[in-house]
Image (spheres, rainbow, N blue to C red):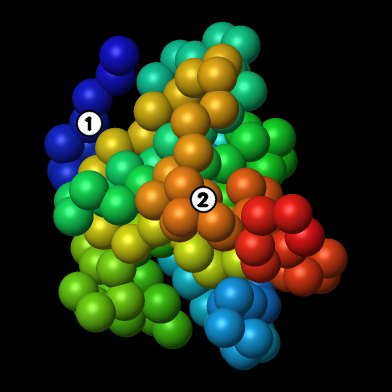
Amino acid sequence: MARMDWEQFTSLENSRWQVDIHCVTRWSKFDTKWRGISLDTIIAHVGMGDVPAYLSAVSLDGYSTNIPTADLCGSRAMIATHYEDEPLTRHHGGPARLLVPHLYFWKSAKWVCELNFTDTEVQGFWETRGYHNYGNPFAEQRFDGE
C-alpha cells in the first residue's frame, strides 16, 4: 500500500490534455482542457511493478467506479486538478477527480481520494445499479447488456 498527502501528490509532474468528454445522458463537450497527474506518473512514483488488472476509484462521498487498468495506462487517464486552467471547483469534483475521457463520464469519479488496484474486478456504484460495466461512449454502452 502506498500513500501520498496532497503536497506529495501535487509535486508530481503535471500533464495538460485537451480532450472530448461524453456523458451517459447523451451530451458531449469537445476540446475541454485539463491539467493533473497522469496515472502513469502515479504508478511509476509508487513503484508498482506489475500493475493489477483493475482499478476501483473511491470518492470522498463513498462513490466508486471500476476500470480495467489497460484503460488507465499509456496516457489514457489522469487525476485532474484543473479544468480550463482553473483549479477544479467542488461542484466539478475538486480538488481532484479521475479523468478517463475515452469512457463515459461516470467513470471519471469526482472527489477521488483512493485508488485500489486489484486482480479481481469489483463493480462500482453505478455498475451495481445496472449501468454498463465498461461504458464505451462510441459503442453506446450505457446499461448492462448493451
Q: Answer whether labels 2 and 1 touch (C-beta < 8 Å).
A: no
Above or below residue 2? Residue 125 is below
- Count of labels shown? 2
Label 2 sits on a secondary structure element that is helix
Q: Residue 4's mark?
A: 1
Label 1 sits on a secondary structure element that is loop
Position of residue 88 measured from the top left corner of the image (x, y, whole percent): 29, 73
**Mark 2 crowd level (few <14, some 14–19, many ≥20, 10 Å Cα):** many
Residue type at the position of mark 2: Glu
Q: Residue at x 63, y 23 (%)?
A: 53
Q: Is residue 146 left or right of residue 53?
A: right
Q: Residue at x 46, y 24 (%)?
A: 117
- Which quadrant of the figure contains the C terminus? bottom right
Identify which residue, 90 or 125, lies in the foreground. Answer: 125
Q: Residue 86's mark?
A: none
Q: CA distance from mark 2 to mark 1?
A: 28 Å
Q: Is residue 90 left or right of residue 43?
A: left
- Which quadrant of the figure contains the N terminus? top left
Return the residue at label 2. 127
Residue type at the position of mark 1: Met
Above or below residue 26? Residue 19 is above
In this rendering, the label closer to the viewer, 2 or 1: 2
